[in-house]
Image (spheres, rainbow, N blue to C red):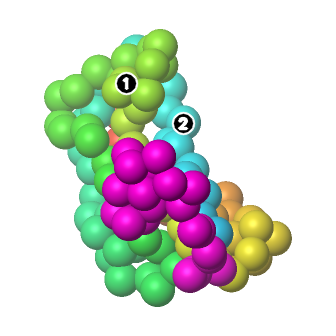
Amino acid sequence: MDRAAIEIALGITPTLSRTDETFSYIKYLELPAGKTVKQIGPWEELLEKEDIVYANISLRKGDIIANITDSGKRPGFVLVKGKSRTEVFKKPSFTAGNFKIIYRLIKFYA
């Protein structure tokens, strides 16, 4: 990709070819706006799964879940990879089961 950027800058049509045939998908956490976070259980074990590229929960105890008005307000996400789009959507790491686990780890004040 660096080579292509230089070629474009020099006015040369870049020679691009695929070097990797992987697909990825980002799934955002959907949490109830206005609730206060009471506790977040350990979720880092998700990162040990081979099909998860990255995951993050950007909440702390005492945070109030904001209305999502832009991507910066999202409370967390999981980035999953696979060999095809279909495979990514069938991955256990992407399915609702894992997200239910994450949702159970986040407790709110009543």
The image quarter containing residue 34 is top left
Marking on residue 106: none
Residue located 37% across and 24% down the image: 73
The residue identified by callout 1 is 73
Number of numbered labels in the structure image:
2
Is residue 34 toward the left or the right of residue 95 in the image? left
Q: Camera-side residue: 41 or 51?
A: 51
Query: Which residue sits at x=49%, y=33%?
Result: 31
Circles 1 and 2 in contact, beta carbons < 8 Å: no
Residue sitting at x 52%, y 43%? 28
As displayed, is residue 82 above or below residue 4?
below
Measure the C-alpha gap from mark 1 to mark 2: 11 Å
Bin the neighbour count of mark 2 within 10 Å (Cα to Cα): few under 14, some 14-19, many 20 and up.
Answer: some
- Apparent side of residue 74 relative to residue 58 in the rendered image (left or right): right
Whole-percent x, y for residue 50 in the image: 46, 86
Residue 13: x and y, percent?
A: 57, 55
- Magenta stretch? 1-22
Q: Mark 1 Cα within 10 Å, few/some/many (few <14, many 20+)?
A: few
